[in-house]
Amino acid sequence: MKHIKPEQAAARAWNRRAFLKGVLASGTVGLLLPGRLRAASPAVPAAANDKVKLACVGIGNRGADVIRALQKTGLANVVALCDTQLGAKHTLGVLDDFPDARQFQDFRKLFDAMAGQIDAVAVCTPDHSHFPIAMLAMSLGKHVYVEKPMAHSFRQIELMMAGEQKYKVACQMGNQGHSESNYFQFKAWTEAGIIKNVTKITAFMNSSRRWHGLTVSDYLPEQPLPETFDWDCWLATAQKHPFNRGYLNGDWRAWFDFGNGAIGDWGAHIFDTAHEFLQLGLPTEVNPVQLEAHNLFIFPQASTVAFKFPKRGSRPPVELTWYDGKKNLPPLPPNFSTQSRPSAGIFIYGEGLNFKGTSHGAPLEILEAEKTEALKLPDVPASPSNHFANFLRACRGQESCRSNFAVAGPLSQTMALGVIAQRVNAPFNFDPVTRRITNHMVADALLDGAPPRKEWEQFYRL
């Protein structure tokens, strides 16, 4: 595949948006809907004392951790396993753990065969393939647990949010810290006015990533395709790519076509509670302040991206600045020791108090320790369930998902806007009402993502 010049990328991106908007408006993508994609009645909660019958799509690597965590709750019965590399080394552990579960390589065949025998689906595939699996599951009335970020593009996330409401299913994004101590602490401290009038947030992730040190000027060259690998299904809605092992087993995170970079991978673990409880919504300005080694194919070696959120009622505007890259360290609060600098975390600057947090649900610390004795800190309730049990109890009608798509959607869309800024390497303005980027044609086109291949268009109609 030839190198794509910037002006060619811009034209392609514009054509992608025009194509996708055209087919959605005309309804042509719905002309050849197979029977498996017919709409279902709203989901019926599993009986309160019954185990949730669970299908798992993506069973290696992170998928294996999620499946075992769901099973460990005692609330689920894994009845189906699906992976495009079924039988590969990284899938064998889960296959051995659940020998009675039916096995599939294509999630569409799973639903064809077992739609009436499952209650819920766990989606632990690469970012670019979350959308079709989740949409098909919801359309069939199945509850959905999907790894973060929710989907690959702003538009896909929008459709998944609508699907959650349309099909009345329980949906949970897998940022597990959203059910841990930080979630309940942030909620209690915000309601009590301990965290108030926040104007500035610094979020960062400075550990090594898979693309650090990688230099590319094109997609990877074609390699022989293993006979046992369903490459077409792995690609899902993405454009056609020659097979190369360099895209597999987490390395897809490096590529714009498949992943969402450090911000999509870690943002949901770092600024998720700030986003929800400060009611940030969607930003109106996004600025890639600094990108190291900007590239058309893979994520920058380091990024500083600033998001400006407008005033919300009585809450002041907030600027959230994201830092990633091994040496792209964020500025520290006054009197903060460099020896205490975490590799990932958040600094929150509010009225009278500043806060430090790390990730994955770890509790916040008040930086002005001398002020804590005079504060009347509210009691913080213990979590009634971890993230996995919360989802399964929601499937049974006993709880509500804490990171449902209505909550996780705007968070994921904020991260998707950050990825667009990394791609175009230019600031832009976003209108949260029209859901469009108003001053950058290519960035606006990227909201829709790449047009799906013809056989995958139908998932945008569910």
Image (spheres, rainbow, N blue to C red):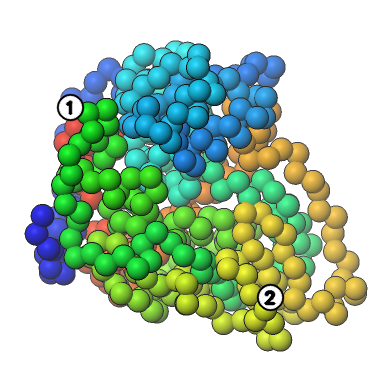
Q: Quadrant of residue 295?
A: bottom left
- Identify which residue is drawn at 69% across, 49% down: 180
Give the residue at the far bottom of this rendering: 335
Residue at 67 percent of width and 66 percent of height: 357
Please state which amino acid type lies under the numbered disc 1: Leu
Q: Residue at x 18, y 60 (%)?
A: 218
In the displayed structure, 161 sits above or below 281; it is: above
Q: Secondary structure at mark 2?
A: helix
Q: Nearer the viewer, residue 341 or 37?
A: 341
Q: Label 2 amino acid?
A: Ser
Which numbered disc flags the more N-terminal residue, 1 or 2? Answer: 1
Q: Quadrant of the C terminus?
A: top left
Q: Quadrant of residue 40?
A: top left
Q: Residue at x 27, y 31 (%)?
A: 229
Mark 1 sits on what residue?
31
- Distance between mark 1 and mark 2 Cα atoms: 59 Å
Query: Which residue in the protein does label 2 denote?
Result: 340
Instruction: Tell me the crowding category of disc 1: few under 14, some 14 to 19, or many 20 or more residues within 10 angstroms, Cα based.
Output: few
Q: Looking at this rendering, what residue extends furthest in the left direction?
A: 2
Residue 435: give x, y in percent of width and height.
36, 57
